[in-house]
Amino acid sequence: MKTILAALATTAAIALATPAAAETLRLLTWGGYAPDAVVKKFEQETGITVEVTVSNNEDIISKLRATGGAGFDLVQPSEDRIAGPQEEYGIYKPLDLGKIDTSLFIPDLLAASKKVTTIDGQVYGVAHLWGTAGIVVNTKQAPDVKGWGDLCTDAHKGKVSMRLKRIPLLGMAFAAGDDPFAAYGDKAKYQEIIDKAGKKLADCKANVKAYWSGSDDLLNMLRSGEVVASESWDSTGFKLNAENPDFAFVAPETGALGWIDTFALPAKGKADDAAYKWINFVMKPENAAAITEASGSFSASKGADELVNPALRKAYKEFFPPEVIAKIKWFPAIPAGIEDMEGKVLDRIAAQ
């Protein structure tokens, strides 16, 4: 008996002397969404180590599809990239909203993200950062650019830029008076809409100085004056406006196209509790403001916009008055096959 007790005591002593394995959160996210200072602060407060992998929508889906939803504990797809991949591949698990402090969120953005990511009554994504696509304009050189179609007028021939991507295609559809999002459920109607928008983009090629592929390309063309207006993200407008107040982000008259990047749990993630702690931590206004400063995109955190630097806060209020926010066209969930249809139209334009 003494031998057994001694052995048990020794085992207990070893267990007490051995530190518990440190918890790790494997985060798959966008550049700027997990800045070093915020990660360090979280690690110090929680003892959880954060491993950050920078990615994008296509890569998030590809990685999770290849593993059946394993390899990461928290991912950040856009709200329109959750329902379709989940129904097709089963790569996410539902969120437990009881573990998320929803009082930290701007109610409208939280509601919008929940609406788009709900499947069979279960929510798979909640809002983190949001932004819009519209037009960045040098207001001194192109004060007349107010909508998507204005990129194609003779007044700015050879002086505009855009990408050959789905956003300009959708923008031209809205400019023509169509609603491509409302046609998502009718592929024949959707094909008709994007064919018409594609013709407009093809006719606009003579106006395009160069199609941009990376933000540095676009920034350089706008700064040099080679380009006076371009389809772009609002974050580009914020960046350029901070350098030169002549630059502004213009929400098209038909409404800017709005995206929300979310928090979502991979189907086979192993650290759900750590993921919920990270969500609640980064949605605190002071932490959310630091992420906005790093990423250039505003947070769904209530009150965070008041804590960013004064110049960025001023630009945000100028670019997004209430009437502009009210007209934002939020991206709905993308049905299977829609992007393939768009890709074929865009490929034809590129080949012309």
Image (tube, rainbow, N blue to C red):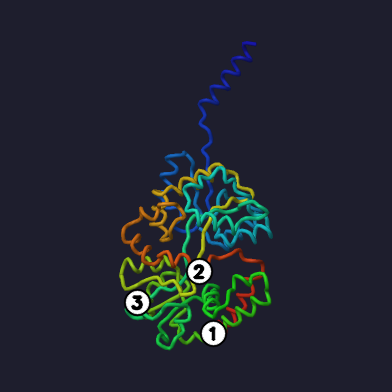
Task: Give the Cα separation between the discs numbered 3 and 2.
Answer: 21 Å
| Looking at the image, residue 267 lies above or below residue 80 | above
Graded by Cα atoms within 10 Å as few (under 14), some (14 to 19) or many (20 or more), the crowding at tag 1 reads some
In the rendered image, which quarter contains the C terminus?
bottom right
Circle 3: residue type: Thr
Q: Residue at x 40, y 78 (%)?
A: 229
Nearest-to-viewer mark from 1 and 3? 3
Task: Give the Cα separation between the discs numbered 1 and 3.
Answer: 26 Å
| Callout 3–callout 2 Cβ contact below 8 Å | no
Q: From the image, tell me which residue sits under label 3.
A: 139
Q: How many marks?
A: 3
Q: Residue at x 49, y 85 (%)?
A: 205
| Callout 1–callout 2 Cβ contact below 8 Å | no
Q: Residue at x 49, y 74 (%)?
A: 254
Chain-order first, disc 3 or disc 2: 3
Helix, strand or loop at mark 2? strand
Chain-order first, disc 1 or disc 2: 1
Where residue 151 sits in the image (x, y, percent)? 45, 81
Q: Report the side of 1 relative to 302 (left or right).
A: right
Q: Residue at x 46, y 74 (%)?
A: 252
| Looking at the image, residue 325 lies above or below residue 147 | above
Q: From the image, tell me which residue sits under label 2.
A: 257
> Looking at the rendering, which quadrant does residue 221 occupy?
bottom left
> Looking at the rendering, which quadrant does residue 321 occupy?
bottom left
| Looking at the image, residue 168 lies above or below residue 92 | below
Graded by Cα atoms within 10 Å as few (under 14), some (14 to 19) or many (20 or more), the crowding at tag 3 reads some
In the image, farthest residue toward the bottom:
154
Q: From the image, tell me which residue sits under label 1.
A: 202
